[in-house]
Amino acid sequence: MTRPMMAHRGRAFEELFARLEAGLRDVLLTARPVYISTSSASGLMEGAIRNAPAGAVLALVNGAFSSRFAKIAKACARDVDVFEVPWGETFDLEAVDRRLGSRRYAAVTVVHSETSTGVLTDVRTVTELAHKHDALCIIDSVTGVAGAELRFDEWKLDFVLTGSQKALALPPGLAFGVASSEFLRRARDVSDRGLYFDVVEFEEFAAKNQTPATPALSLLYALDAQLADVLREGIERRWERHAAMRDATAAWLKRAVTRVDLEIDILAPEESRSPTITTVTLPENVKSADVVKAVERRGFVIGAGYGKLKDTTIRIGHMGDHTLETLRPCLAECEDALRDVGGIKW
Ligand SMILES: *Cc1c(COP(=O)(O)O)cnc(C)c1O
């Protein structure tokens, strides 16, 4: 990232861009161009809404980030219906199907890995259901891409967005998005889709190996280095590593719960747990802030809960460049901290 700047309309930049595109296509498993946006992931959440075909939006909400997606759609003056399940749960897909049949929707928003609850949603099936009702599906995979299985072309997805600072383990400041040809075709008919996040412009410039506006070049240098690492490991192996970290975290907690009578558990149901993040519900007398502080004193950073789960849960992120070897000492310190703070005996 300390490398000198270069002209973003020059040959050297175009070579860099072409290399980044090829790498990102291998991460998202698509032959479509991957748009590189100088923004945080929220920028492309808003962009996806603004480019989506005119008409009502059905927002599937099961946590803080999917709730935010609904809020973004409303802020973009969309007619939004919210289909909400209790935070920590996943969706009954038959109920989603019925809801999609109840009214004509142009688009559906869904979060792949709900970073507030640790729930993983079957976005492939949600997309199939949307298509059955002639709607397009917009997927926030900010803590999914590069950690959880996602196959853009094979799963026939419409729009997927992610950010640089989660499972890709880069500094914040970049977002990546990919649109199907159908999503792009329908976007052309949207007259008020704006400009900074216009997928038609992204597409035209990507064809020239350029970005529409000046990119955050230093972050692209970092992306170049990181993509080389990601692809050296292989995307499927990367998913497996994340799944192994999720399973190790679950096994660690289960050992505790079965050994002593603890009111501490993983929030997400067993069959839909995100490979990148685990949200743990705490006993009533234990506050998340105290646990987080105690873990920090022991040299590790975990998250408190998010949104309305702030005080009652902790979140252990196991994504990006982490491995079982770096996770295990963290879990050991979490265990020690919980014992200290909550008087919990393991
Ligand atoms: C982090 C996160 C976002 C927001 O990303 P920003 O980069 O802060 O805009 C959105 N959705 C999910 C699921 C996230 O984890």
Image (cartoon, rainbow, N blue to C red):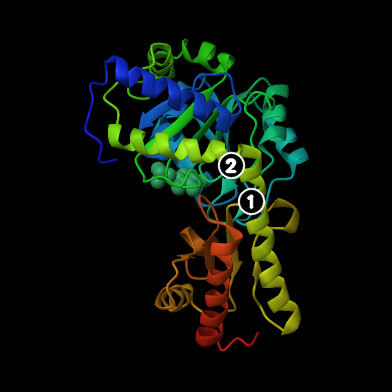
In this rendering, the answer to whether 320 lies above or below 193 is below
Image spot of residue 70 (x, y percent): 50, 40
Query: Counting other residues with Cα less than 10 Å from the Cα at mark 1, is it few (<14), some (14-19), or many (20 or more)?
Result: many
In this rendering, the answer to whether 321 lies above or below 331 is above
- Give whichever of 311, 302 is nearer the camera: 302
Q: Residue at x 41, y 38 (%)?
A: 225
Q: Residue at x 72, y 34 (%)?
A: 125
In this view of the protein, can residue 140 be seen by the observer? no
Image spot of residue 339 (x, y percent): 56, 85
**Element carrying mark 1:** helix
Q: How far apart are marks 1 and 2 (CA)?
A: 10 Å
Image spot of residue 145 (x, y percent): 56, 39
What quarter of the picture does the N terminus occupy? top left
- Give whichever of 147, 157 is nearer the camera: 147
Mark 1 vs 2: CB contact within 8 A: yes
Judging by the rendered image, the residue that carries numbered circle 1 is 241
Q: Which mark is residue 233?
A: 2
Q: Which residue is drawn at 25% across and 36% down?
A: 3
Residue type, mark 1 in image? Arg
Query: Counting other residues with Cα less than 10 Å from the Cα at mark 2, is it few (<14), some (14-19), or many (20 or more)?
Result: few
Residue 29 figure quarter: top right
